[in-house]
Amino acid sequence: MKVLVVGGGGREHAIIKKLRENKEITELYALPGNGGMAGDAVCVPIGAKDIDGIAAFAKENAIDFAVVAPDDPLVLGAVDALESLGIKCFGPRKNAAIIEGSKIFAKDLMKKYGIPTAAYEVFSDMDSALKYIETAPLPTVIKADGLALGKGVVIAETREDAENAVRSMMEDKVFGESGSRVVIEEFLTGPEVSVLSFTDCKTLVPMISSMDHKRAFDGDKGPNTGGMGVIAPNPYYTDDIAKQCMDTIFMPTIKAMNSEGRTFKGCLYFGLMLTEKGPKVIEYNCRFGDPETQVVLPLLESDLFTIMRAVADGCLSDVDVRFSKESACCVVLASEGYPTKYDTGFEISVDDDLAGELFIAGAKLSPDGKLLTAGGRVLCVTCTAGDLGSAIKNAYDNIKRVHFANAYCRSDIGRRAMLAVRE
Ligand code: AMP
Ligand code: GLY
């Protein structure tokens, strides 16, 4: 069985390592992958947004199954292109990936089907948006409609910040066409939970819950990043809340997408906030989260490829999806200065006694075979243990066994979650 995975970050490395546990897979390709995963998959330098290139490679190499992991190719229609060649895929088609590709689509879907989310207004004209924020309650949340590398959300504390955000999105077009329309929404408070789920549009199986740490610095300070670490399970996400989410958010979302003629197959990610008025949707993603995947998949005891095939074949209810009762912690090691300005090209070395899973996100191989840093988020280490406190300790003990110049990590991943454990 020949399998290809589209994407090249830590999330894709985690998916690839898990897929390798299935012995039916004889050839595994990553497009483009990165130098740090070259030992686990054949990395082919075709960009994740190059849909024609991906389809041509899949056809020429008689690929049997494709996993499209990142948002861009999903929203651009990579699954549609591969399926038109008769290749089975894990991931939603373009008409369902819009649930992440357009925040306005997602908000209108939730409103139409009564799925709890923050109150909002949509603007396609800057003057109306500016007028609205003159009286909007503060803080207010401004979101670019389209994909913006996870940076299209501004929480404005003052009217001036709100005006600047609207102008930069709609006038200066810092996110290109993604910001030509904006959502301005109510600011919610409460612990955040990420719940990834497998769904074939009939059955939905939530994966173990997790908690991302998006800010660059300790104490949840500094700019938003692609995620500096994550823990699972999320102690705020109790069984009662899980049931409530299944009944009021997860299944209603799948049914809503079916009713709209946009059946969703793949991994549907629910970004939730547990507010005083109950769980509400902050965002949907049409894919596995990064770095959530790096804690969720190491806790998956069932075979990932079997689940992915069942999702593609529409028979998810027939397969076993089981998670370990352990906890996991993933600490990201980034280049100092990320997410703003940072240097790369430093050699990465790993001590022999590293105990944990190493997932590489931003690295390349030099001509003489050295692994060099090549991105902001360079790698992460995930450790598991019987309880969350031990998983966190193990992750920090082991991140010290990976070295490169200018390495930076947060020192408090999981601290907020431990408060809930102790409560
Ligand atoms: P997103 O890119 O939609 O995940 O948003 C990034 C982050 O902004 C989220 O993880 C939240 O921490 C925050 N956020 C987004 N929407 C809201 C909201 N309505 N109220 C409070 N915080 C929000
Ligand atoms: N960790 C957030 C995301 O994958 O969008």
Image (tube, rainbow, N blue to C red):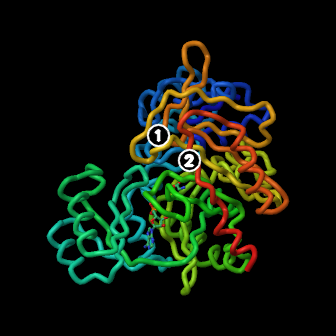
Q: Position of residue 82 (x, y in %)?
A: 51, 36
Please tell me in which quarter of the rendered image ligand 1 is found: bottom left
Q: Secondary structure at mark 1?
A: helix
Cβ of mark 1 under 8 Å from ligand 2: the answer is: no
Residue 4 shown left or right of residue 307 in the figure: left
Mark 2–mark 1 CB contact (< 8 Å): yes
Please indicate whether residue 397 sits to the left or right of residue 131 in the image.
right
Query: Vertically, is 175 above or below 258?
Result: above
Residue at the image position 36 percent from the left and 71 percent from the top: 141
Q: Which residue is mark 1?
A: 78
The percent coordinates of residue 143 (x first, y second) are 35, 64
Q: Which residue is mark 2?
A: 91
Which residue extends farthest bottom?
277
Is residue 357 left or right of 256 when viewed as pictured?
A: right
Who is closer to the viewer here, 370 or 14?
A: 370
- Mark 2 or 1 closer to N-term? 1
Q: Which mark is residue 404?
A: none
Pick whichever, 268 or 383, lies toward us.
Answer: 383
The N terminus: image quadrant:
top right
Q: Residue furthest front?
A: 405
At 77% across and 62% down in the image, what residue appears? 389
The span from disc 2 to disc 1 (Cα, nearest Å) is 9 Å
Where 414 falls versus 287 (above or below)?
A: below
Amino acid at circle 1:
Ala
Q: Is residue 61 left or right of residue 385?
A: left
Q: Secondary structure at mark 2?
A: loop
Residue 202: percent from the left, percent from the top?
Answer: 63, 62
Residue 243 placement (x, y as % from top left):
69, 77
Res 123 → quadrant: bottom left
- For image coordinates 56% across by 66% down, the residue present is 254
Residue extending farthest to the right is 386
